[in-house]
Image (cartoon, rainbow, N blue to C red):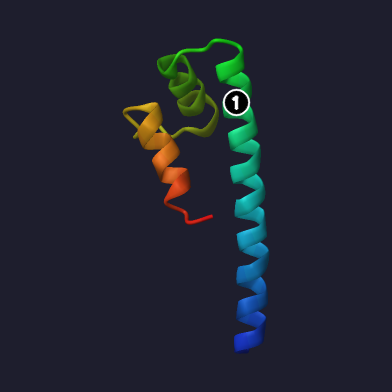
Amino acid sequence: MATINEIMSDLDVINQQISAVIVEFNEWLDICREMGMTDDEILAKINEHWDFSSFSSLEEAIEWFEDLGI
């Protein structure tokens, strides 16, 4: 059975990985906007590449990432 310290260490690693994904997503989102892509075009790319087809709007996708609390 894992100790509390081992679990906390594992959670820290997971948090770092999620943080890296959020940073990468935000950078990608900025590039898309700089290229003049519309929210619908960006959402289509999100759904295509990350299979988040349950998102009905770009705002909903962004809120999902923000709700991770990172």
Rendered image quadrant of residue 28: top right
Task: Using residue 19 as the reference point, say whether residue 40 is left or right of it.
Answer: left
Secondary structure state at the residue bearing disc 1:
helix
- Residue closest to the eye, 70 or 51: 70
Task: Using residue 68 as the reference point, say whether residue 34 is left or right of it.
Answer: right
Image height of 23 relative to 55, above or below: below
Residue 34 placed where, x, y %? 61, 16
Rendered image quadrant of residue 59: top left
Which residue is disc 1 drawn over? 30
Residue at image position (64%, 42%) is 23
Image height of 13 relative to 49, above or below: below
Residue at image position (62%, 78%) is 8
- Residue closest to the eye, 3 or 41: 41
Residue 9 shows in the view: yes
Residue 4 placed where, x, y %? 60, 87
Residue at image position (62%, 62%) is 14
Residue at image position (58%, 19%) is 32
| Badge 1: residue crowd in 10 Å (few <14, some 14–19, many ≥20) | few
Residue furthest to the left in view is 56
Residue 53 placed where, x, y %? 38, 31
Residue furthest to the top in view is 36
Question: How many numbered callouts?
Answer: 1
Residue 2 shows in the view: no
User: In which quadrant of the rendered image does the N terminus lie?
Assistant: bottom right
User: In which quadrant of the rendered image does the C terminus lie?
Assistant: bottom right
Task: Using residue 50 as the reference point, say whether residue 19 is left or right of it.
Answer: right
Amino acid type of the residue that numbered disc 1 sits on in the rendered structure: Asp
